[in-house]
Each structure stands twice: as structure tokens, then as C-alpha cells.
Image (cartoon, rainbow, N blue to C red):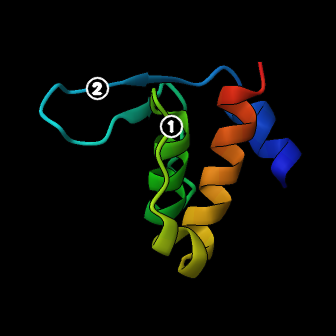
């Protein structure tokens, strides 16, 4: 599954809104993933990367998204 996500999501870039809201990963289609996964992925791909430590421990979708985002966005 991680390999499939890496292929689909390779080449992470972020777009910030400038309003203090978290950036969204783009232009990847993450529509099949949960909100928690998307938020974790976006946090890992942010520059600089950030991680909500409590949520990372308690939310499996967030931690999976963060780990996948970290692998893809920082792996190059």
C-alpha cells in the first residue's frame, strides 16, 4: 500500500494560502483517503515539516499520512 501511495503521490509540492492555515498537498488526487491521512500528508510535506505529536500517536490515519508524506516529500 505504501508503494502504491508513493507512486501516486510522488513529487510532493505544497501551496500555502498565506493565512496561517495548513498547506494542502498539490496537485495530487487524495480523494480516496481520509481527512486524517490528508492532513498528516500535508503536515509532512509542509516546509518546514510539522507533526502533531499527540495526533500522530492516537490517529492511525494521520500517522500513516504523515509517514507516507515524509517518505515521498523528503525522500528525494
| Residue 64, quarter of the rendered image | bottom right
Left or right: residue 44 compared with residue 72: left
Q: Residue furthest left?
A: 19
- The disc at residue 16 is 2
Task: Work out how far the residue at label 2 is from the one at label 1, CA to CA, in angstroms.
Answer: 13 Å
In the depicted view, which residue is nearer to us: 73 or 28? 73
Mark 1 lies on residue: 49
Q: Residues within 10 Å of mark 2 (few under 14, many from 20)?
A: few
Position above or below: 29 against 40: above
**Secondary structure found at label 1:** loop
**Secondary structure found at label 2:** loop
Q: Residue at x 60, y 52 (%)?
A: 66
Mark 2 vs mark 1: in front? 1
Dot placed on the residue nearer the N-terminal end, 2 or 1: 2
Position above or below: 2 against 10: below
Q: Are marks 2 and 1 in contact (CB under 8 Å)?
A: no
In the depicted view, which residue is nearer to us: 48 or 5? 48
Q: Residue furthest bottom?
A: 58
Q: Residue at x 46, y 45 (%)?
A: 50
Q: Position of residue 47 (x, y in %)?
A: 45, 26
Q: Residue at x 57, y 55 (%)?
A: 32
Q: Position of residue 35 (x, y in %)?
A: 43, 62
Q: Position of residue 1 (x, y in %)?
A: 84, 55
In the depicted view, which residue is nearer to us: 49 or 35? 49
- The disc at residue 14 is none
Position above or below: 33 against 50: below
Q: Residue at x 77, y 18 (%)?
A: 76
Q: Position of residue 72 (x, y in %)?
A: 72, 32
Amino acid at each position: 500500500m505504501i508503494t502504491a501511495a508513493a507512486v501516486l503521490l510522488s513529487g510532493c509540492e505544497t501551496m500555502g494560502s498565506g493565512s496561517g492555515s495548513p498547506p494542502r498537498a498539490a496537485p495530487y488526487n487524495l480523494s480516496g483517503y481520509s481527512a486524517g491521512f490528508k492532513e498528516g500528508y500535508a503536515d509532512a510535506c509542509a516546509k518546514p515539516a510539522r507533526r502533531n505529536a499527540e495526533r500522530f500517536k492516537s490517529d492511525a490515519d494521520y500517522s500513516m499520512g504523515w509517514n507516507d508524506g515524509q517518505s515521498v516529500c523528503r525522500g528525494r
